[in-house]
Image (cartoon, rainbow, N blue to C red):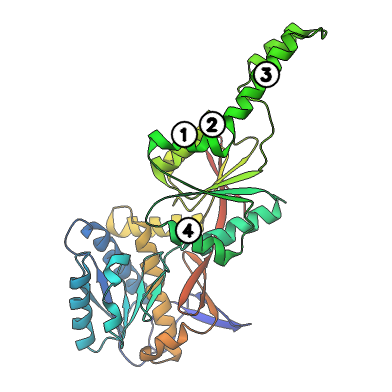
Amino acid sequence: MIKLIKIFFIIKFGVFLLFFQTVNAKEKIKIGLLIPMTGSSKEIGQSIIKAVSLAVKDIDNDTIEIYPKDTASRPNQALKSAFELKQMGIKVVIGPVFYESLTYLDEMKDLTFLSLTNKTLDLPKNVISAGINSTSQFKTIKKFLEKNNIEKTIFLTPIQEYEFEIKKGMKDSKIKIFKEYDYNTDPTKLTKQIEEITKYKIRKQNLEDEITRIKNSNEPNKEKKIKRLEKRYTIGNLNFDAVVIADFDESLKSVTTSLLYTDVKPKNKHFITLNQWFNESLLNETDIQPIYYPSINKENFNDYKIKYFNAFNEDPSHLSLLSYDLLGLVYYLSLGSDLSNLNKLFKKQNSFKGKIGIFDIKNNKINHRLNFYKIDEKELIKIF
């Protein structure tokens, strides 16, 4: 018996779960790797190479052979490198990393590419998107909303290059939308837009009118009532229960700050966003807490980070975790099928479990069953 990757599989109800064990193998498994090895993104490429080498080490023999090629984050170079892999008889490739590098890969019809992009629109037929796509994220948010009987949710989408990916994810997830708004990320325009969405000026005027009314009335204890009102910023109920902000980093913080300015508080309305990859800077933003988001399994990610750090004395990129799992997936699929038929396998419905969590495969797409987290009082809390 030849010792390979520590994997075994269970088939039940069409679900494949990957675990660790020893198995038999007879042939070499050649896998291409299309990554940026030069240029501004070469550090990401280096991290992916290390992650794949870590996976090969876990396999613990020479059955799997990895052939890295440079994309330089350019479509022409990605095509050239893909052609070189094809000439070597390779059928399956992990990568490219970036959506832009996929442009000409439909010309390589004999190759199947497991790209690390999370974009799913207008992909070549021989490319499977393996990133954490918007559909996976909205399905997880939908689960949270339904569990908590949250009926009225508004959705805020930035006018960015990924805007249509967001809208596709909302549609595919069949999430219930109360109202949907697009916003300009320009700070000089953002606050005004949020004011309009939250009807801030009307609610502020309501407060001023109420203070005036009480001042001119004969109500008992009116001075106390006025002092109490003067501590407020607005009066009037908001007609939504939660807000989903499809944004990241400083732009996300700008939107939440604008919501606070318009007297919309996370203690009263659920603030929900997309996968933040456990951005630690959010832990210190106490004014916008609690804030919720879907993501991969944090415990598994921490275990992987420790393994990676012990091997290379540095922290991994989150994309390297994806590549680590994809190598295990390709190996698993190779056990029961010729890799030249891999594209057909991705058209069937099945699932597998990796470090990142459970993946569902159907119609050349990979969706992820994500966990859901809350940041509150500077702590990250797993909801489910």
Q: Mark 1 or 4 closer to N-term?
A: 4
Kindly state the secondary structure of the residue where label 2 is placed.
Answer: helix
Could you tell me the amino acid type at mark 4? Ile
- Mark identifier at residue 15: none
Q: What residue is disc 3 on?
A: 209
Could you tell me the amino acid type at mark 1? Thr
- The front one of 83 and 15 is 83
- Expressed as whole percent of the image width and height from the top left, the position of residue 230 reads 64, 14
Query: Are the residues flagged by discs 1 and 4 in contact, CB closer than 8 Å?
Result: no
How far separated are the C-alphas under marks 2 and 1? 10 Å
Q: Mark 2 or 1 closer to N-term?
A: 1
Give the mark count: 4
Kindly state the secondary structure of the residue where label 3 is placed.
Answer: helix
Q: How many C-alpha atoms fall within 10 Å of the one at disc 3: few (<14), some, or many (≥20)?
A: few
Q: What residue is disc 1 on?
A: 191
- Expressed as whole percent of the image width and height from the top left, the position of residue 262 reads 55, 30
Q: Nearer the viewer, mark 4 or mark 3?
A: 3
- Mark identifier at residue 260: 2
Q: Mark 4 or 2 closer to N-term?
A: 4
* Picture quadrant where residue 37 is located: bottom left
* Picture quadrant where residue 189 is located: top left
* Picture quadrant where residue 79 is located: bottom left
- The front one of 11 and 346 is 346
Could you tell me the amino acid type at mark 3? Asp
Name above or below for residue 254 compared with residue 207: below
Would residue 13 be found to the left or right of residue 318 on screen? Answer: right
